[in-house]
Amino acid sequence: MAGEAKTAENLVEKPQTLEALRAGIVAGRTRATELAASYYERIEKKNPRLNIYLSLTKERALEQAARMDALAAKGDPLPPLAGIPIGIKDVLVMQGAPSTAGSKILEGYQPPYDATAVKKLEAAGAVLLGKLNCDEFAMGSSNENSAYGPVLNPVDPERVPGGSSGGSAAAVAANLAVATLGTDTGGSIRQPASFCGVVGVLPTYGRVSRYGLIAYASSLDRIGPLAGNVRDAATLLGLIAGHDPSDATSSPAPVPDFAAESDKPAAGLRIGVPAEYFAEGLDSEVRAAVESGIAALEAAGCSVKPVSLPHTKYAVPTYYLIATAEASANLARFDGVRYGYRSPSSETLAAMYSNSRDQGFGAEVKRRILLGTYALSAGYYDAYYLKAQQVRRLLAEEFLRAFAEVDAIVTPTSPVPAFRLGEKTGDPVSMYLADIYTVTASLAGICGVSVPCGATKAGLPVGMQILAAHLKEATAFRVARAVEAAQA
Ligand code: GLN
């Protein structure tokens, strides 16, 4: 039985909170270098089984840890994440470190610069342990599309960790990092967080600079934190958010102290429950866990009322048209000339392009390039891409109307708990359909959090998705804290 296997292997382990770790480092009880070494030891032990890290950035990590120890030894003030071990999804570039985006086409690529979010974490004192496995170019919901093999879910290694940030969620669940960065285009932070029993944040579109993110669908891509608890996730978001001159779409809005905001009680907040997210196809145990989370919110003093989001039923086709259209354009740059893999045996330039792409991209990425190119082609553009943009607008307006009446909307993060490896790989459409609850917020540009709200009888974690209006992450964190508190 999976349950026995997991106890025997002891793969799940909760990281210490940032506060506890920081207190140890500030007081000199914990040395950052020793903490990093202990994480690398655990990675060495568990990673061969779970396949969470694609590469380690040991030298850089240990240098940073030594810097933090030196500061502490001198009694200098320490930055907020001094010595905290953090993992980075492989679609985010780190100077000189392999950054493959889970693709063979980027094998061996070593970017010449750091993503802004990465740079900000390091400037805050974080020790960056390495690069985390993910679906190829973040396309997928199970991490099975990685060219480097799937990640196993630490809760039950016969199951997927979710995707595309499967490595980012599994790393936190197995305590192979205190927290991680992931990316979310249609659910890729929230869904793996829910499958692995950790917290995942979808920041408002533009809240976090995308500079240095290997693009999938630029109008949807977001970078956000995953952590073992809501407050830590809030702290991390505060440190990576903010305007960046290198990303014209990054928001100039001031960044609140999200951790302090999350300490405010949820009492008095108005919570909306959309019937469309509790309809056919929702697993009964997932429903029960989410309903218990809603009951916890009522007990915490929130008012709960129904809201309606009738365009939800169009969200999956709308998302898959827009995401693939943008992907087909973004991935045109991988031609065997500028980055990574080049097919060695081509006689002409055109053959070199097509062979490099044919050999470098995996099946799902090719499927999406084909779908997206088709949707954008002359004669079909109006029927598909333009129509999808119109539906996207309707969905966004529908959310805005709902947020005139409620402060947050709660739903299941995924209609099902973590599924078995291989269960959906033969049927891409069933994989796409399971994104139903996450792609709506992606299309609307609003923010959200996935927080654990219970488990199935077999012990599989269930996540509750808490959505809030643009730039209202603080509200989502407050609600998430109340759900989390009820779990303790
Ligand atoms: N599962 C969705 C997709 O495959 C979302 C992925 C993501 O958010 N990066 O596109």
Image (cartoon, helix red, strand yellow):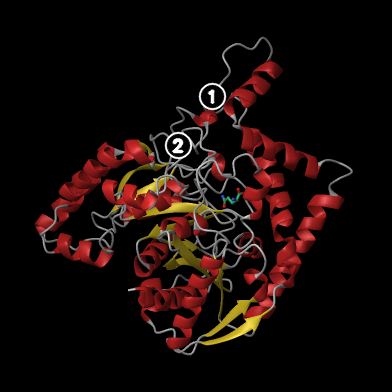
Mark carried by residue 412: none
User: Is 189 situated above or below 51?
Assistant: below
- The mark nearer the N terminus, 1 or 2, is 2
Q: Which amino acid is tagged 2? A: Ser
Asked if the beta carbon under badge 2 is closer than 8 A to the nearest atom of ligand 1, the reply is no
Residue 179 appears in the picture as rendered: yes
The x and y percentages for residue 101 are 50, 39
Q: Nearer the viewer, residue 478 or 340?
A: 478
Residue at 73% across / 56% down in the picture? Answer: 318
User: Is 110 situated above or below 39?
Assistant: above
Q: Residues within 10 Å of mark 1 (few under 14, many from 20)?
A: many
Asked if the beta carbon under badge 1 is closer than 8 A to the nearest atom of ligand 1, the reply is no
Residue at 69% across / 77% down in the picture? Answer: 308
Q: Which residue is mark 1?
A: 341
| Location of residue 315 by image quarter | bottom right
Left or right of residue 209: residue 446? right
User: Is 295 situated above or below 242?
Assistant: below
The x and y percentages for residue 6 are 33, 50
Q: Secondary structure at mark 2?
A: loop
Residue at 52% across / 46% down in the picture? Answer: 142
Residue 118 appears in the picture as rendered: no
Q: Which amino acid is tagged 1? A: Tyr
Q: Nearer the viewer, residue 134 or 9?
A: 9
Q: Secondary structure at mark 1?
A: loop
| Location of residue 455 by image quarter | bottom left
Q: Residues within 10 Å of mark 2 (few under 14, many from 20)?
A: many
Q: Which residue is mark 2?
A: 99
Q: Can you name the residue that lies furthest to the front here?
A: 1
Left or right of residue 392: residue 233? left
